[in-house]
Image: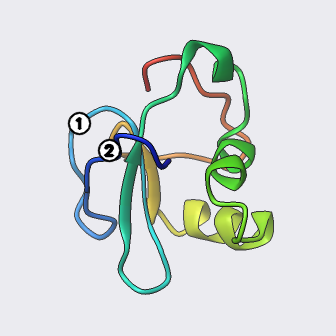
């Protein structure tokens, strides 16, 4: 969720593709899933991109709808596909 990240709103759902989430201080990130990352769980994907945040915290953000996949809410256990 770092290289080439374009901003996206964590409070306003967007229809673009990608994993979108907001940080604790209103930070916004958009990340595309690479081929090598296909099949990984959403919470693990986010933890890999933000190692300073706990997976528990990330799972809460996902459940609260502040981290979305393709602009839609998802579960922490959701398996990601390349290009999302």
Q: Position of residue 34 (x, y in %)?
A: 54, 21
Q: Quadrant of residue 40?
A: top right
Labels 1 & 2 near each other (Cβ < 8 A): yes
Figure check: 23 above or below 9? below
Q: How is the image coloured?
A: rainbow
Label 1 environment density (alpha carbons within 10 Å; few <14, some 14–19, many ≥20): some
The residue singled out by tag 1 in the image is 16
The C terminus appears in which quarter of the rendering? top left
User: x and y percent of residue 2 in the render?
Assistant: 47, 49
Q: Residue furthest top?
A: 35
- State the residue at coordinates (65%, 42%): 42
Residue at coordinates 23% horizontally, 36% vertically from top-left? Answer: 16
Residue 25 vertical position relative to residue 65 in the rendered view, above or below: below
The quarter of the picture where residue 66 lies is bottom left
Reading the image, the residue beneath label 2 is 71
Tag 1's secondary structure? loop
Instruction: Give the CA distance from mark 1 to mark 2.
Output: 6 Å
Seen at 71% across and 54% down, the residue is 47
Residue 78 lies left or right of residue 11; in this view the side is right
> In terms of sequence position, does the residue under pointer 1 or pointer 2 come before the other?
1
User: At 63% from the left edge and 51% from the top edge, which residue is drawn?
Assistant: 46
């Amino acid at each position: 969720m770092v290289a080439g990240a374009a901003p996206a709103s964590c409070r306003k759902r967007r229809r673009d593709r990608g994993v979108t989430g907001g940080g604790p201080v209103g930070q916004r990130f958009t990340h595309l899933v690479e081929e090598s990352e296909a099949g990984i769980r959403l919470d693990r994907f986010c933890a890999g991109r933000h190692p300073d945040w706990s997976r528990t915290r990330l799972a809460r953000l996902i459940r609260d709808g502040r981290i979305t996949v393709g602009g839609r809410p998802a579960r922490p256990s959701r398996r990601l596909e390349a290009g999302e």
